Image: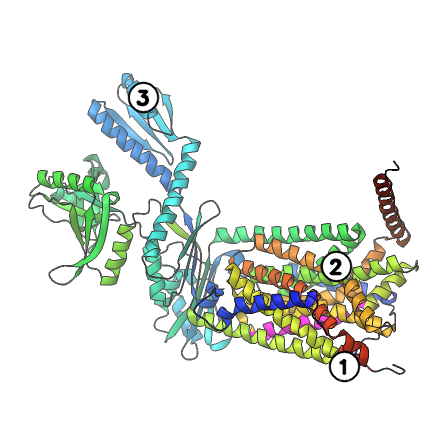
């Protein structure tokens, strides 16, 4: 089966303005959503407690809310269904420090009249841990960006790196705009998703860049726009196909992974789509706007080859004892 | 058809994967199995903080106590002791005595002394402060470890994290009650003290304030069974739990559980001397600041053994005995983070993750076969081998498989075929251009290689950072994903090429690109 006509060069850049405007609009809408709605940060970051309880019958949510009022630990608690009508999750910003009688024990005690249940999970994070995690998450994110910037600069050129970073930020902001809009919990798994999207996005982008580089090196074409169009057209089938397989697995995680994986699977689902879009329509295009010159790059390459040849010539001379 | 070196590498990798993943997959008794994370098998994960500043204040208190002893012996009159968080100021009545006290204090290791008139302030040097804190933490870790070892769970982990945090991981906790028991056992300070009841003033205890008691050198303690009952005991204990060598559960004549303890030689001697001197008086058995019993001393008690009786269940008595045996916690600990997962939820998570794995895997495999024909089958073989290798590596390295780790494997399946998609697309390009298959394949691999390497290296870099900065479960994600990436370079790049080489002569002969590479039939082809 073939879905893409390989020999045709599509004019992706010709419609560059449309995509640019689309990305621009989506990007700023996302920023606006995040600014207005913010994230519903999980307890990993804010501190607090999550208790997951499974009842043997339908969970009596009204009664549970009523019972929770007995303890001030649950003053700002929310109770919601989790996966099925028998299972609920209680979230409260409070946490306890004592070992022998903690918030999980309290929950068990005050809910004992609401029916037969089993406490399946108690996650409690103190406020200090949350702060530490936030710092760590942000550091990890920035370090990864830096590492990518360095690798791409080393393997390609700084303009490529710059464009790649802009594309990544574009992907991540839009993805998390969706996360904010749909009020999906932002927890430690979401940070993993964020870094994965980052990795995935750069992976896609590099495949396209590699083709651009190959085209520059192998063809005589001087029109950079054409070279990019050709590279994007050639890699488009692989970009789409891989995105499809990744999309398959992320979709199964989203469908079967349950609510517990939602903080990971939802951003991944959005991120894969946005990442694919930006690799095809945004990343390569950005390189054009950074003022990349094919001529200069070829010259640099030629010089590199010349230097290499010169070195080898010298070595050969040295070894043959002419010097 | 003859084997080539790539095929041999693939075969070796396959054997490796099969051998090391077999114990986990077939649930064999021998061999290393995959360790499931607490989120998958159920258990308790706690990050504990240590109030190490309390170690400093108790050091200061003990210095003050020794100064008190010393001054009493030398007949030096101390006007007052005033305690700060990390220092004590001793005010002397006579300025001439300052020198003697100062000399005594200088001899104490790690003390920092400042003198101002009649006032002597003692604190600890910065070096001593960090040494004391360090000691408090390692003592706490050691004690908690000892207690949990005797609790009866398989492989409890107690490790230090960061500067002053303790990570406790208990797998296999089944019920909420069991979890609570474990937590109580960990947190119990288990400080045993034998104290003399102040018989002269004991009758007045209910009308006495704390300050009154202190002025006589006494303290007022609650009764363990009935908080209404107060006991007046001498402040400085006769001996404490550090001289205890053994504690175990016994039963009294009414068959109620109690704890028998044995003292070491030094403790036994002090105990014998004291009881000999104090016949007719009472001895309070104090545990964690509460009086458990205060029996009359009828005669000198030699042999150094005693009992703690109280109203507790056999299980409570057992845990208490464990806590006493493993020594007391010198500093209080508190919970910074706790995650507990019931075994049923863990099983549900495994089921959900396996379902996602199976269906994601199925979709990808079908798609590859459908789109690429036999080339897709070859890529699929690589993915399957890849999975075995990941599992084998996890078992072999003793890494822990967590829920995010399983998500990482699922995600990896989608990414693993990518190398083969890149390669297959390249091969198709070559074939379309009319290049013969053997050259198309060779060029396809060669050209795809650079892109694959570039992008895999960036991704492994991202995983490394994720590992370094992630916590527990996230680390598992980074581990499985980077193992997958490494394994896929072997199977997808080297291995599949080997398979093509094996069938090369056939491909060349029948030239059926639709069958081999899933290409559409075209006019003239």
On screen, residue A321 versus residue B472, left or right, reads right
Q: Position of residue A34 (x, y in %)?
A: 65, 60
In this view, the mark in front (3 or 1): 1
Vertical order, A57 against A285 (above or below): below
Q: Which residues are magenta?
A: A235-256
Label 3: which residue? B103
Q: Secondary structure at mark 2?
A: helix
| Secondary structure predominantly adopted by residues drawn in magenta | helix
Chain identity of mark 3? B
Q: Position of residue A96 (x, y in %)?
A: 41, 56
Callouts 1 and 2 in the same chain: no
Label 2: which residue? A167
Q: Residues within 10 Å of mark 1 (few under 14, many from 20)?
A: some
Seen from the viewer's position, the closer of residues A113 and B64 is B64
Q: Cβ–Cβ below 8 Å for labels 3 and 2?
A: no
Indicate whether residue A244 is drawn in magenta.
yes
Vertical order, B291 against A64 (above or below): above
Give the spatial CA distance, label 3 vs label 2: 71 Å
Marking on residue A43: none
Is residue B419 among what the camera can see? yes
Q: Residue at x 54, y 53 (%)?
A: A133
On screen, residue A205 versus residue B126, left or right, reads right
Q: Residue at x 48, y 78 (%)?
A: A85
On screen, residue A67 versus residue A164, left or right, reads left
């Amino acid at each position: 089966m073939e879905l893409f006509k390989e020999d045709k060069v599509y004019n992706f850049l010709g419609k560059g303005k449309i995509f640019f405007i689309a990305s621009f609009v989506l990007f700023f809408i996302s920023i606006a959503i995040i600014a207005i709605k913010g994230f519903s940060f999980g307890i990993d970051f804010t501190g607090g407690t999550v208790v997951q309880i499974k009842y043997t019958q339908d969970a009596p949510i009204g009664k549970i809310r009523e019972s929770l009022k007995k303890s001030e630990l649950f003053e700002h608690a929310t109770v919601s269904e989790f996966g099925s009508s028998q299972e609920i999750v209680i979230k409260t910003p409070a946490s306890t420090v004592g070992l022998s009688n903690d918030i999980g024990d309290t929950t068990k005690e005050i809910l004992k009249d609401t029916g037969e249940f089993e406490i399946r999970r108690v996650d409690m994070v103190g406020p200090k841990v949350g702060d530490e995690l936030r710092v760590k998450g942000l550091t990890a994110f920035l370090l990864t960006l830096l590492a990518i910037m360095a690798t791409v600069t080393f393997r390609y050129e700084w303009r490529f790196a710059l464009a790649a970073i802009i594309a990544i930020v574009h992907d991540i902001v839009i993805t998390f705009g969706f996360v904010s809009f749909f009020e999906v919990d932002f927890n430690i798994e979401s940070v993993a998703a964020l870094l994965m999207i980052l990795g995935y996005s750069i992976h896609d982008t590099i495949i396209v860049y590699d083709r651009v580089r190959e085209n520059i090196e192998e063809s005589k074409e001087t029109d950079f726009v054409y070279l990019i169009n050709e590279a994007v057209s050639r890699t488009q089938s692989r970009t789409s196909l891989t995105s499809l397989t990744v999309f398959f697995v992320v979709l199964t995680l989203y469908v079967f992974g349950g609510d517990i994986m939602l903080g990971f699977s939802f951003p991944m689902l959005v991120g894969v789509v946005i990442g694919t879009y930006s690799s095809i329509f945004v990343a390569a295009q950005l390189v054009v706007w950074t003022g990349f010159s094919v001529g200069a790059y070829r010259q640099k390459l030629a010089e590199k080859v010349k230097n290499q040849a010169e070195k080898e010539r010298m070595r050969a001379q040295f070894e043959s004892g002419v010097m | 058809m003859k084997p080539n070196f790539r095929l041999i590498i693939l075969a070796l990798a396959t054997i490796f994967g099969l051998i090391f993943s077999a114990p986990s997959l077939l649930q064999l008794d021998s061999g290393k199995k995959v360790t499931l994370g607490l989120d998958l098998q159920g258990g308790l994960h706690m990050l504990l903080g240590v109030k190490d500043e309390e170690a400093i204040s108790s050091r200061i208190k003990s210095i003050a106590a020794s100064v008190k002893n010393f001054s009493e012996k030398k007949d030096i009159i101390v006007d007052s002791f005033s305690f700060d968080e990390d220092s004590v100021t001793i005010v002397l009545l006579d300025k001439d005595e300052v020198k003697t006290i100062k000399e005594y204090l200088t001899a104490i290791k790690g003390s920092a002394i400042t003198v101002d008139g009649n006032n002597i302030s003692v604190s600890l040097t910065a070096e001593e402060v960090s040494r004391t804190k360090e000691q408090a933490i390692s003592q706490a870790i050691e004690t908690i470890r000892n207690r949990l070892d005797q609790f009866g769970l398989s492989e409890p982990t107690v490790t230090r994290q960061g500067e002053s945090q303790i990570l406790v991981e208990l797998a296999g906790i089944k019920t909420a009650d069991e979890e609570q028991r474990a937590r109580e056992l960990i947190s119990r300070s288990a400080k045993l003290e034998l104290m003399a009841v102040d018989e002269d003033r004991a009758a007045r205890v209910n009308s006495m304030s704390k300050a009154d008691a202190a002025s006589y050198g006494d303290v007022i303690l609650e009764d363990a069974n009935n908080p209404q009952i107060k006991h007046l005991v001498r402040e400085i204990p006769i001996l404490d739990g550090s001289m205890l060598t053994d504690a175990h559960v016994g039963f009294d004549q009414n068959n109620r559980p109690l704890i028998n303890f044995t003292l070491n030689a030094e403790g036994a001697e002090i105990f014998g001397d004291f009881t000999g001197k104090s016949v007719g008086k009472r001895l309070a058995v104090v545990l964690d600041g509460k009086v458990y019993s205060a029996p009359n001393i009828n005669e000198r008690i030699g042999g150094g053994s005693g009992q703690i009786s109280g109203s507790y269940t056999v299980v409570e008595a057992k845990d208490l005995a464990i806590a006493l045996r493993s020594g007391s916690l010198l500093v209080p600990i508190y919970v910074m983070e706790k995650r507990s997962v019931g075994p049923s939820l863990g099983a549900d998570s495994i089921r959900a993750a396996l379902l996602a794995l199976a269906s994601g895997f199925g979709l990808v495999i079908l798609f590859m076969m459908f789109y690429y024909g036999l080339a897709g089958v070859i890529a699929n073989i690589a993915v399957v081998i890849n999975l075995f290798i990941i599992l084998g590596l996890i078992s072999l390295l003793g890494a822990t498989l967590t829920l995010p780790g399983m998500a990482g494997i699922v995600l990896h399946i989608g990414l693993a075929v990518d190398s083969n998609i890149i390669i297959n697309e390249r091969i198709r390009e070559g074939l379309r251009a009319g290049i013969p298959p053997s050259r198309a394949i060779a060029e396809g691999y060669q050209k795809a290689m650079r892109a694959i390497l570039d992008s895999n290296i960036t991704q492994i870099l991202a995983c490394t950072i994720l590992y370094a900065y992630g916590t527990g479960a996230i680390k598992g994600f980074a581990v499985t994903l980077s193992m997958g990436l490494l394994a896929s370079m072997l199977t997808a790049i080297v291995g599949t090429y080997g398979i093509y080489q094996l069938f090369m002569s056939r491909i060349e002969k029948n030239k059926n690109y639709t069958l081999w590479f899933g290409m559409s039939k075209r006019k003239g082809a």
